[in-house]
Amino acid sequence: MYRPNLMFFVLYFSLECICRSQSDIYSLNYIYTALSKPLELPGIHEFTAMGLMNDKQIDYYDSVAKKKIPKQAWMREKLPADYWDKGTQSRKSKEQWFKVNVDILMKRMRHNNTDVHILQWKHGCEIDRQSDGTLKFIKGTDQYSYDGDDFLAFDDANMQWVAPVVQAQPTKRKWDGVQILNQYTKGYLEKECVDWLSKFMNYEDKEFSRADSPPRVYVFAKKAKTAGHVRLICMATGFYPKDVIMQMKKNGVPLTERDGVQSTGVLPNDDDTYQIRMSVQIPEADKETYECSVDHRTLKAPIVGKWDGICCDCSSFGAVVIGAVIAIIVVLILVSVVLFVLHKSGTIVIPGLKTTDQGSQNAESSDRGSEEDVKKSMLPQEMGKWSLNYIYTALSKPVELPGVHEFTAMGLMNDKQIDYYDSVSKKKIPKQDWMREKLPADYWDKGTQSRKSKEQWFKVNINILMDRMRHNNTDVHILQWKHGCEIDQQSDGTLKFIKGTDQYSYDGDDFLAFDDANMQWVAPVVQAQPTKRKWDGVQILNQYTKGYLEKECVDWLSKFMAYEDKEVSRADPPKVYAFAKKAKTVGNVRLTCMATGFYPKDVEMHIKKNSVPLTERDGVQSTGVLPNDDDTYQIRMSVQIPEADKETYECSVDHVALKKPVVVKWDGKCCDCTQVTGVIIGAVVVLVLLLTVVSSMLVLWKKGKIFAGKKGDLPATGIQAPLNGNGNGAAVLNMPGKRDDASSTDSGQGSNESLEKEAILPNGAIEE
């Protein structure tokens, strides 16, 4: 019995070239390996699949981990989570396909299960990048091997399969008998594979050519919702690549989630750099040492930023009070000294001098921040039947009618249009907001390529049908294809498959339909019989079609239902903040408007000066809408203005969750500008008031209105007259107490992987 050389297998799949290609030749290949039974050898799995670009591994899957994972940093960064989820499902499907087919081949080869047998599949493409950057297709590869020997290979030039061994002849005849399968294979190798290779080359080029960028680190605090507390925030932004380590520390000891630390996670900026924020709530009076440590591969040593104890939007009333108290103490000392000197000199008589402070300082701080209650629909998810269908319509020739195109394709969920493509725009577009928001750009790019491919398929096949029907091109003829699934949502939320649909019609009459229960095609007209025989002759195609209708279509429908449910029932209002920080330009501050925590992502924000919106011409900068890690969104706008600018600035934010726009006025404060100003203001105000009082007293004294010290002097206002009337009695000086009423109001608002041949025919093709 033949025993395969497992040493070759182990070495081939264990080694990975880590050198970049130095030539202009690039390749993208996928290799699948299935064993007939498990081997008790470390690292050798019953099924493995990997992607290779220039023989360098870019992704990997095995039958133990059962997860498709990236093997290059740029693959991890550039491709969305949905790509890897879909890729995992595709690999699981292929794993099952290989289990079935390795058994079929063993029987055909008359092999038993005593020894280990290996079935492998390799497919991909090779291109030459020209000096002008264009890509020239060189060759495509689609081949199968069994126990290390060639079994079947696709001849791309002649569009047929080559069988080097007798046992492969039955498969060759079946696959060549389905010409559309060969057309699809050729199209994949020469177009789709090249498109993906081009995209990956671009990702890798950016990875190697993009200069690393170090983080800018900021540490600041803002008033917390809990009275007497502040939220300490550490922010790092502008760094690349995205891997970063951030820690908030108290007295040198890192704080954790148990201490209440919250993180946004790493988020993208609009310039291909990244940002991250961490925050923790602490008592405002906490005098411990807090710092923020950020490490990144661009740094020789971590950046450590210490918090200066300043709160950005906490009331500065305290600083004014401090200044006032200092001024009062100084002036009272000065007045006391003056009075004492005058008294000693006999200029005034103040027996039993008493100072009665009848005043009081009333400091009142109110936080009146209010937020409109947003009523959200909390209705339970609608039970009953749901459907997902895709309908393609091709005309035999163009018609000069508005809105009627030679080729159209649309997706329908519960008969409501969710996406659309036509032969004029040549772009697959979303028709529902939740489709636009939830599905990444890569989904639409891939969907566009898929629709373009189907458009070409329909052009070829409508001509074939016209010949078969003996129709000429005088009249317009129509070929349509509809495929999809219908489910019943149970009371417990589970989905029960009801039926799948895969049918073709020609000129409005049924032409061919798939019988899902019996897994065969039904031809209601004679002209459809040849197609039925061909397609039923490829049993794996029927298995794939059944699998798509009952599993893959239902999975997509389930996902779309969840997206729509969130869209309909969820509307989170934005929290809006307006604050300023010291700008790099001396004498200026950067006024920032931030809205966060809103959903859906569509939002309108303006920074206004005296109610007039500012624009990019005024220097307004925007981050654009960015995702938070809780499925909400954020946006920031900022503009640099003179620190002394006394105009009225405000931030206006409108969102579907709001009854009217939120408008937050800037209070004129600067987060990290010095607070000496507040102290000075308080001191100056009190000094002016008290010096005015002292000056008035001295004027009155000179006029003899107060401090009566001679016979006949009249008692001054506020001085008790002597009972004996001789002017020498006791005088009680009633110094009017200063009543300081201060109130401060401060309110703040703030793929389908389809790299690989997912569908071997348009019917049952995965919709992305």
Image (spheres, helix red, strand yellow):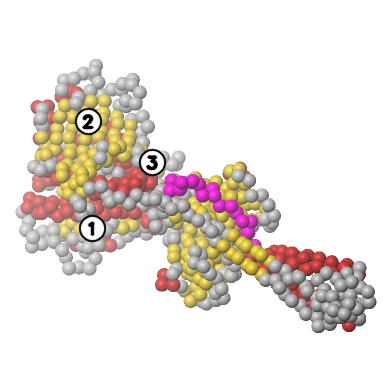
Determine the residue positioned at 56% across, 52% down.
Answer: 664
Please identify the dominant SS of the magenta region: loop
* Mark 1–mark 2 distance (CA, rounded to whole Å): 39 Å
Type of the residue with mark 3: Leu
Magenta segment range?
652-673
Is 440 situated left or right of 713 in this image? left
> Which of the labelled discs sits on residue 48, or is there none?
1
Based on the picture, tell me whether residue 669 belongs to the magenta stretch. yes
Is 551 situated left or right of 374 in this image? left
Instruction: Name the mark nearer the viewer: 1 or 2.
Output: 2
Query: x%, y% of residue 508?
Result: 19, 26
- Front residue (pair 748, 758): 748
Instruction: Name the mark nearer the viewer: 3 or 2.
Output: 2
Q: How dense is the environment of label 1, judged by Cα within 10 Å: few (below 14), some, or many (20 and up)?
A: many
- 292 up-or-down from 18: above or below: below
Is 428 situated left or right of 532 in this image? right
Based on the picture, tell me whether residue 224 belongs to the magenta stretch. no
Asked if marks 1 and 2 touch (Cβ < 8 Å), the reply is no
> Which of the labelled discs sits on residue 135, or is there none?
3
Q: How dense is the environment of label 3, judged by Cα within 10 Å: few (below 14), some, or many (20 and up)?
A: some
Q: How dense is the environment of label 2, judged by Cα within 10 Å: few (below 14), some, or many (20 and up)?
A: many
Question: Element type at marker 3?
Answer: strand
- 21 up-or-down from 744: above or below: above
* Mark 3–mark 2 distance (CA, rounded to whole Å): 35 Å
